[in-house]
Amino acid sequence: MKMRMFWRILLGMAGSLLLSAVSEARIITGTVEYYVDNTSRVEIEKVALESAKREALEQAGLYIESESLVKNNALEKDAVKAITIGTTKLVNNSIKKQYSQENGKEKLTLTAKFDVDEKEVSENLKRVTEQKDLLALFEQEMNSYTDQLLKYEYLKAVSDFNVDQDENLLTDEEKNYLFDYMQLGTIDGLQTCNSYAYTAYIYGKYKRAEQIYKIIIDNSNSLKWEDGTEKNFYGYMYEMLAEVRLKMNDYVGAEAYVDKALSYDAERPKAMIQKGEIMAARGASVAEQLKHTEKIEKINYVTGNSSRALILMKECRYKEAFDCLNKAILYIEKHPNEDNIRNLSVLYDNLGELYEKISDYKNAEKSYKKGIELDPNNMNILNSLGCLYEKTENYTKAYDAFDKIIKYNPVNGRTDWNSNMKALAYFNRGNISMYMRKYENALQDYDMAKKLDPNLENVYVMKEKVEKMLRNGK
């Protein structure tokens, strides 16, 4: 809706000039295939139509052709792409949908035709450049549009790669698929491959995720970098590789990736935090860990204090932990910006945990709710709140919290969610069902938890316990 409103404004300002312009339209066609899986036909058709539009524009070469316009009008390539997409119209009655069965799954093949007026694209580029206030408005809309692209790329990744399969390496077909995207030498190609890597990561397919990230790195030579972006790209890639290895409890491998990330930028906060995790896993003393947080604090005040608070909490040094968290929260509140909102929500999650440690459940609940208010999509905090309700025997609210986590679809590119969290939510909801004497429901949830994470602690014990209750008629 926002994007549509923006283009009304843009084309309205164009006025008579657009009406008098000679039309230079071309009809382009896009075809995509998607597995429907558990997604509704209506939803997957929306995603497929958007992807078909992008596919059509790629085929037409409009992105490449617009590079000269980027230079002349001092606009970023991504802005040009969005303007092109914004002025693209679906040809009436051109959508063709065909459903078929393949490998036991329902598959959608969607073809659509689009009308692109290159003259209109060129004129709109000039107007956006000349009118600075319009450019500012466009940049706001671009952020919303980018979020939508992330959603489409994520769902496309779920469709193209079988995320339900066992942990194994990529097939040759999948490798070639990735190579083709990277050989485009475009940010779009990179973004698509990164979506596949991230999808594998959040579904707990860590070996597959690692292999995709390596393919991205090995085939990124053809990309054109702006000043400073190359170091940030490689730093991020190696941080994600380190994250994958940490999930696999391979601290030697994780440290090698962290060191690589820091070689591109010695002051990357996430890599420094990962370094601290590795130190703790290897048995570094508390004094050594706290010393490391001082290094982090010099780079990022909030991250340094929050990291220190977690270490102190584990050592039951609660007063010192409270001081560190309050310092971090106060700093963010004095320096508000969008980037800090998610950090602040995490701090309130930590604060809630700290209140739980001293059995102050009322303030713990307030802290968790504050964190969720700041970031409603943070499933970690919702899990913390659910566990608090379970501890205080408020089973209805606990059930609702875990149920929301199970139904959550991480389509916004988050890196703080993975399928193990969903497995844990099934396990926790199963426990709540057991407390509420809904034993059959509990067993179903335990089975789902095992399927998503066979290594989940206690699920086998709890399932056996509930089965025994059923046999004894309790």
Image (spheres, rainbow, N blue to C red):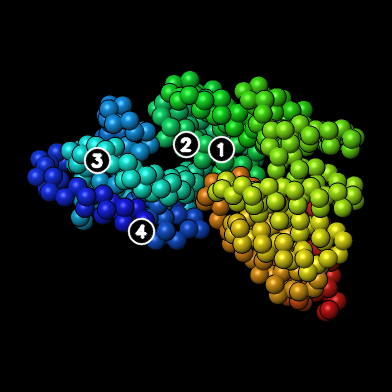
Closer to us: 75 or 80: 75
Earlier sequence position, callout 2 versus callout 4: 4
Other-residue count near label 4 (Cα within 10 Å), few / some / many at <14 / 14–19 / ≥20: few
Q: CA distance from mark 1 to mark 3?
A: 38 Å
Q: Quadrant of the N terminus?
A: bottom left
CA–CA distance in space, label 4 to label 1 = 30 Å
What amino acid is labelled 1 in the image? Ala
Q: Residue at x 70, y 51 (%)?
A: 329
Residue identified by numbered label 3:
127
Do residues under tags 4 and 1 come within 8 Å of each other at their CB atoms? no
The local crowd at label 2, few if under 14, some if 14 to 19, many if 20 or more residues have their Cα within 10 Å, is: some
The image position of residue 3, as x and y in percent, is 34, 53
Q: Position of residue 472 (x, y in %)?
A: 85, 76
Q: According to the image, label 1 marks what residue? A: 197
Is 406 located above or below residue 143 in the figure? Answer: below
> Given this view, does label 3 or label 4 mark the residue nearer the observer?
3
**In the figure, 370 relative to 71: above or below?**
below
The residue under label 4 is 1
Residue at screen point 64% across, 60% down: 372
Amino acid type for the residue under numbered disc 3: Arg
Tell me the element at label 1. Answer: helix
